[in-house]
Amino acid sequence: MVEVALRPVEDADLDALFDQMRDPASVQMAAFTTKDPDDRAAFDTRMAKVRASDDTNLRAVTRDGRLVGSIGSFVVEGDTEITYWIDRSAWGQGIAGRALALFLDTVEVRRPLYARAACDNLGSLRVLRKAGFTTVGTEISYAPARNAEIEETILRLD
């Protein structure tokens, strides 16, 4: 059985995370990404800010000891949201679901907890719903990866 674990993000993880977060197919699926996923300076600045923030909990996701993504929570306008990014090579293996379950079990996050996903990101929506998130609405938002406004599903976990 595959072992999925969480640990703090280390400096040595940043190159791999940068590569994962700029994979074209992953960026297209995630939709709500940075303006330029290939901008390493912007990535480094964002990661430094995230890692230093008291309102953010960021963890590396590993599969059998190998880094395969990240998961974290952050506060936006008083609401705590969850986000995760799993390397495309690990999609469809239950890793996102296991990482989310571990995060919810081991990291203290304020409830309710919110999540957002492009309405056509069925895999991510399935992971969130399996973890107990329920849809509380949708909105049209600008998705930089698609250079268009698209429908986004908003989910909540009490």
Image: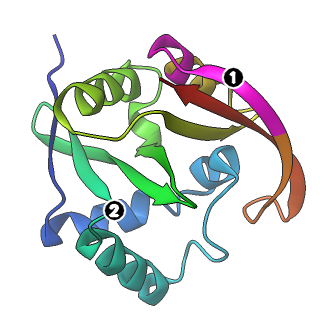
Above or below residue 6? Residue 64 is: above
Residue under pointer 1 = 135
Q: Quadrant of residue 57?
A: bottom left
Q: Out of 33 and 58, give the one closest to the viewer.
A: 58
Element carrying mark 1:
strand
Q: Out of 7 and 65, give the one closest to the viewer.
A: 7
Q: Position of residue 154 (x, y in %)?
A: 69, 35
Left or right of residue 150, residue 6 in this image: left
Q: Position of residue 119 (x, y in %)?
A: 77, 33
Q: Out of 135 and 146, give the one closest to the viewer.
A: 135
Q: Amino acid at mark 1?
A: Thr
Residue under pointer 2 = 55
Residue at far bottom of view: 41
Q: Is residue 84 shown to the viewer in this render?
A: yes
Say whether residue 134 is magenta: yes
* Identity of the residue drawn at 90% across and 56% down: 149
* Identity of the residue drawn at 84% across and 43% down: 139
Q: Which residues are magenta?
A: 128-138
Q: Is residue 124 shown to the viewer in this render?
A: no
